[in-house]
Image: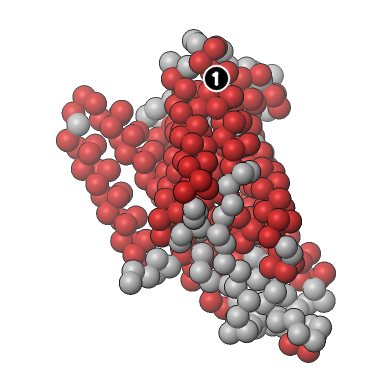
Amino acid sequence: MLQLHSPPLFLFIALALMVSSQIVEALCGKSTRFAYGIAANMVAVLFYGSALVPVKRIETGDGMFFQWVTCAAIWLTSMVGYLVLQSTKFQPFAMLGGVIWATANMTVVTVIKAIGISLGFLIWGSSSLLMGWASARFGWFGIAAQGVAQPVLNYCGAGLCLLSGLLFFFVKANVEIQTNSEFVPLLTHLGSYGCGQTSSEFWIDVVGPKTRRIVGYLLAVLAGLLYGSALTPILYIKNHSSSPDSMFYGATNYDLEYLYPQCCGIFATSTIYFAIYCAAMNNRPRVYSRVVLPGIVSGLMWSIATYCWFLANNYLSSVITFPIVTAGYGLVAALWGSLVFKEIKGSANFLIFSIASCAVLAGSLMTAISKL
């Protein structure tokens, strides 16, 4: 049986896809920019949607240590990219996006435990798309409002994304909760827990299925709203780069220049959260050694996906790449969850899930097309 959490498998896929994108670029002649943008976008979709697969069947406890390891890997990868790109100016304001992203990422383990990969990714993908759409369409947070060529199509696309989010609430995911005593934290003593409770138990592991589903759904929506706002500081800098009165006057429009500052914000915020967590746990955090390598792989995959996405923005318009990436990674995660991890069972359940998935895909495409 294929070991899905095997790091070499994902690293091999990463290298293969990056090489194939270079081949596409070389063969496409005059269509190079479009072809490379599409190739980079597809790599981003695949890696975003698969980023949590390495840890799916590994106990993470409350997820705080996994979160920190993942963010450390993200920061280290971005630092290598920063040195390779030889970026000229560090924009501290872009770190705010990292703060927002790391805060959203705090909910990931709880969401995956509560409602699984399929629903988790699709729900926060839908709400992320809606937040990104609304902030750009109406000019929230100091960003210039973007007009669209076809307003009716634009609003219909947003409506479909909202409808999909409501439909996902009626899907019941079959999620296995790890409570095996084999998974024991390294830095915690069994005696500090009550009689009969294993050290690996997290609060979401012991609540009822109905409560777990509601909590998972709400946290996924919250995560999506935050994820959808994570790029706002970068957009703000770019929108004000042409204003002589702005402190960001002359800032570059090249998205990759802002990735390292954002990742610095991610790592700094996750480190602060982890330090607060350690203090709250009386310096006995739940540290699971088995999450270290999967956490590094997850961070590496997320970093590759983000580099590819930001690179695609320079070949295609971001108003095209954002809806495609947001809906696309949700569908990739849905395939992992439904086909490999068997999270969606039952014909009626699968029918609702399929309709909602098609709705978010159609909504994202309508949103992108309406701006052309």
| Whole-percent x, y for residue 184 in the image | 64, 83
| Whole-percent x, y for residue 347 in the image | 47, 49
Does 1 sit above or below residue 365?
below
Report the front residue among 369 and 187: 369
Q: How many numbered discs?
A: 1
| Whole-percent x, y for residue 357 in the image | 48, 39
On the picture, is 183 further left or further right than 252? right
> What coloring was used for the rendering?
secondary structure
- Of the 4 image quadrants, the one containing the C terminus is top left
Residue 198 visible here: yes
Q: What element carries label 1?
A: helix
| Whole-percent x, y for residue 28 in the image | 19, 31
Q: Mark 1 points at which residue?
A: 156
Where on the picture, by quarter, is residue 61?
bottom right
On the picture, is 284 further left or further right than 91? right
Report the front residue among 118 and 261: 118
Q: How crowded is mark 1: few (under 14 residues within 10 Å), some or many (20 or more)?
A: some
On the picture, is 4 further left or further right than 125? left
Question: Please, which residue is most extreme toward the bottom here?
Answer: 191
Q: What residue type is labelled 1?
A: Cys
Q: Which residue is drawn at 51% across and 64% down?
A: 56
Q: Which residue is drawn at 61% across and 44% down?
A: 170
On the picture, is 279 further left or further right than 155? right
Where on the picture, by quarter, is residue 8?
bottom left
Report the front residue among 253 and 208: 208
- Of the 4 image quadrants, the one containing the N terminus is bottom left
Report the front residue among 73 and 175: 175
